Image (cartoon, rainbow, N blue to C red):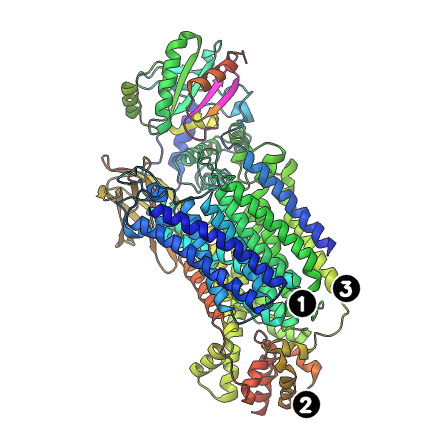
Amino acid sequence: MKRVLAAIALAILTTSADRLDAQAIPAPPVQGASAPDPSEIVGEPSGKRLTGDALELETKRVSALLRCPVCQGLSVFDSPAEMARNMKIEVRDLLARGYTGEQILKYFETSYGEFVRLQPPLRGVNWLVWISPFVALLLGGWIMLVRLRSRPNTSTASDESLASSQLLDESLAPYLASVRRMAYDNPDDSKMSAAPNPGPVTMGDQK
Amino acid sequence: MTATLGRFLVDLSLLVATSGAMVGFAAGFRPSASGARLARRFAYAFSALMTAANLVMFYALLTHDFSVSYVAQVGSRSLPTWVTIASLWSSLEGSILFWGLVMSIYIFVATFATRRDHPEYMPFAIGVWLACAAFFAFLIAGPAQPFLTIASPLADGPGPNPLLQNHILMAVHPPFLYLGFVGMTIPFGLACAALLTGRLGHAFLRPLRTWLLLPWTFLTVAIMLGGWWSYEVLGWGGYWAWDPVENASFLPWLTATAALHSAIVMERKGTLKGWTVTLVLSTFLLTIFGTFLTRSGVFNSVHSFTQSSIGPTILVFLAIALVFSVVLLATRIDRLTAEGEITAGASRETVFLANNLLFVVFTFTVLIGTVFPLVVEATKGTQMSVGRPYFDKMAVPIGLALLFLMGVGPALPWGRATGEQMRRSLLPPAIGGALAAAIGWATGVRHGWTLLTLAFGGYTLWITVREIWLPVRQRMRARGEGVGEAIVASQIHRGRRRLAAYIVHAAAVIVIVSIAVSSTMGKVSEVRLNQGQTTKIGGYELKFIGAEERNEPHRISTAARFEVRREGKLVRVMEPAMNLYQGQREPIGTPDVMTTLTHDLYLSVMSIDAAAQVVGLHSMVNPMVGWIWIAVGFMGLGGLMALIPSRRRPVTDRDDLMTELRPIESAPVTSLVEEGG
Amino acid sequence: MNRRVLLVGLAITIPAIILFVVSLGRDPHKVRSPLVGRVAPDFTLLEAGSGAVVRLSSLRGKPVVLNFWATWCVPCFAEHGVLTEASRQLGPNVQFLGVVYDDKEEKILQFLKENGSAYPTLNDGGGKTAIAYGVYGVPETFFIDPSGKIVAKYEGPLTPQLLDSNLQKAAGRS
């Protein structure tokens, strides 16, 4: 018990400098009381006892992976709810006592169920949710490539249909095409398809 | 009395929508001018009736007529007028009625705007719109009836959900969301009409694109407003938590964005018709899916005690719409023959394809992450979560790839780029990328993904600005025009749609970069302060001056006052508060946000004890958050700008003809660069 | 008719529809606590007011009803009456324990003074015990059998009937 309190006191004292001139929250548990001990569930602490900035960073990382049970999908780190704050403090306490992030996640999971892990752990059926986006990407990419390859590798679509397709009134197409031939004195289809913006270029050339 | 009138109008609108849908389909299968006219009249009649029903509800709310069940549920005499108006969409029944209003406006405007065009398509489109309208009218008339008569009304009501009353954004966000969501019915109807007729010609692409772009613009702004509301009200200092409700609004946005891009390829190349139509159908289906998610209660947390009665009805509609869409696509997609094709190689159209692939994978990822807990629960019986850590991990690489493509695409020409063209257009923008990353590094960014985002952002922004600028310079050189004149001529008059697209792109770059920076570079601190104590965060010194209680008509506000100092100088006094609303037991926090050019100082109280003068303070410095709201605003403006129809010029002047002929989206920079150098 | 589109489309939509139908049918009140069937996490807490030390494992040998609540929780109010009444009736055969989550000592005492008390009420300041029990909100009640194993959990306010049926389980008479 003393060890716990010492660790909590240490944690409070060594948190970021922001806290030095203010009382850290919340008040430590009353002397004589003791909460259930995580070591009964996840074994003895198997990591390093964290302090200072390392403790704060790891608290942030681990509590961002835990779901605030009373919120709409917010993590314990993000949530301003009272319960989330208590859970964040519990995470910090356990890290200061040397429990690893994975141990802490397991401890919360034992009491709250897998529901409490915002990031589905990689096991069993959860693999599906992790892998399926990649499968979708590969499958989609493959279909796309196959479709592109299966086409004859001619040059691009003819500029003719392209330009006429711009028009709202399709009946004007033949007329406009003839005007366009007038506009480019020597129309070179292949050149135009590579650079289908001949208007300003011609004018620039003239200058 | 009022309630009876409302019920009558809703019932009549249901009748009109149902018969109108049948008339529309009949007129579509056996085209005749009189049939089409009749279908239009039914559409107008539905719009009039549904609008009238909404006006009746507004009247009942404003006159505090507590004999109307919905008013008794959400009304209160002590509310400010804006809250009373907003309470129309604050609760389930009213929000469905409001949905009907938005739908009636859309149907009216879309029917009216197309009354002279596309006679072979429009009866079908009207039929589909009215079929959807009939479903919502049915919801209002039955499971979500807001016009029940209360025999012995009380003198006053409880008022709407306090979260609604707590911020003005809640009066703005839902209308935009509905304008985005409901509006997707219009392109859905048009796409169905294209499939039903088995044609999708060039002329019909124009209304399809316009009516997709309009709700897309609203939805874009709505998603931002939702995030902003969450940021200003919920007190956790973030704006996006990937919760199912947020995902529900994001999914149709993703597919609609993909469809807007594939429609460009369709316009240019005459291909991807079936694909574009599929995306439009998916967008609509995802809006209905989102409505189901948020209204059915399947995602209520274990401690939620409400179960909605409209869930099963929406599910039936969703199922019908899904099966209808699949069968329609399967039977008709082969009739939408392509007029052109896309070949492999480095070109703008292949980048468009990659863009579509990524958007679809993005949609799939968000969708699977959202429904996966349901899948696991249905199959294994255990409860699990898929939350922000998962979505962040998936969204970051996809978002980065899209950011990069947003630069590469516009830099490449249609057709096929030569190696020389690619070097000239793709390499110089790397300077912009390096510059942005260097600025990030210099200002303290060390997070790998954020630096990468900055680099890609700088790269894409460089290209986007170049694409806007080059035609201007071109014109200045070619005609000796001044900068202003050239900008007006080349961008506002001729290439408005092109400019609009690039404004949206540039704004999107800012949004993505701001999200990356704000979510990795923020500072947080939680402290408990007594009166007179100070705390420091990110260069600010916050001094707790004291807490005071204020009695306002509909709430008790307990505000904590802080003096904010920077380098010893008083910058501002901030007052995060806790508001206790009438008839509520738990107070709701209201953060106070100070926005500066580079960052926000965000104060929210976790607890206040006005008697003991103790406050639990959650303070944050969030860089670049304000940029997100502004940039999304520009995305919306860009969307609106692209909607302004371009003037049709008489085909006389040779030069004007040239402009008309010039493909709007083209202008490969390389040719201009060559010419310039 | 494009059969590929039809097959792919139906392969996506049919399972989706089935999934949503199944999901609609589930009862969000039914919570499967992973602790049910396990030994109740042991704790030592102080009784509100008296400061007496109560250790859960020292109560083995009879069923324990462990009720998490708070004075700011509205449904807890009605439930408190049910539990107090039951505790008075059952006497020493069943041990009732209240654990107050996230509350102030003086508010607890005030509440007990106004509403009566028949069993120890423990103060879980900081909520560590609530976290160990996976408490989502209040009220939540755990039923522990004489061997110290959790046999049932109920979320929400207990009625006399619910209390009775769960106690049957805890007494091994289910």
Left/right placement of residue B440 relative to residue B272 reads left
- Residue B100 in the image: state x and y as whole percent: 45, 53
- Rounded to the nearest whole Å, what is the CA distance between mark 1 and mark 2? 29 Å
Picture layout, residue B282 above or below residue A182: above
Residue A186 badge: 2
Chain containing the residue with disc 3: A
How crowded pointer 1 is (Cα within 10 Å; few <14, some 14-19, many 20+) is rated as: many
Q: Amino acid at mark 2?
A: Asn
- Residue B525 in the image: state x and y as whole percent: 38, 43
Q: Amino acid at mark 3?
A: Ser
* Residue that badge 3 annotates: A150
Picture layout, residue B438 above or below residue B134: below
Q: Which residue is at 67% across, 77% downward?
A: A161
Choose between C9 and A181: the one closer to the eye: C9
Choose between B312 and C50: the one closer to the eye: B312
Q: Which residue is at 48% across, 11% downward?
A: C60
How crowded pointer 3 is (Cα within 10 Å; few <14, some 14-19, many 20+) is rated as: few
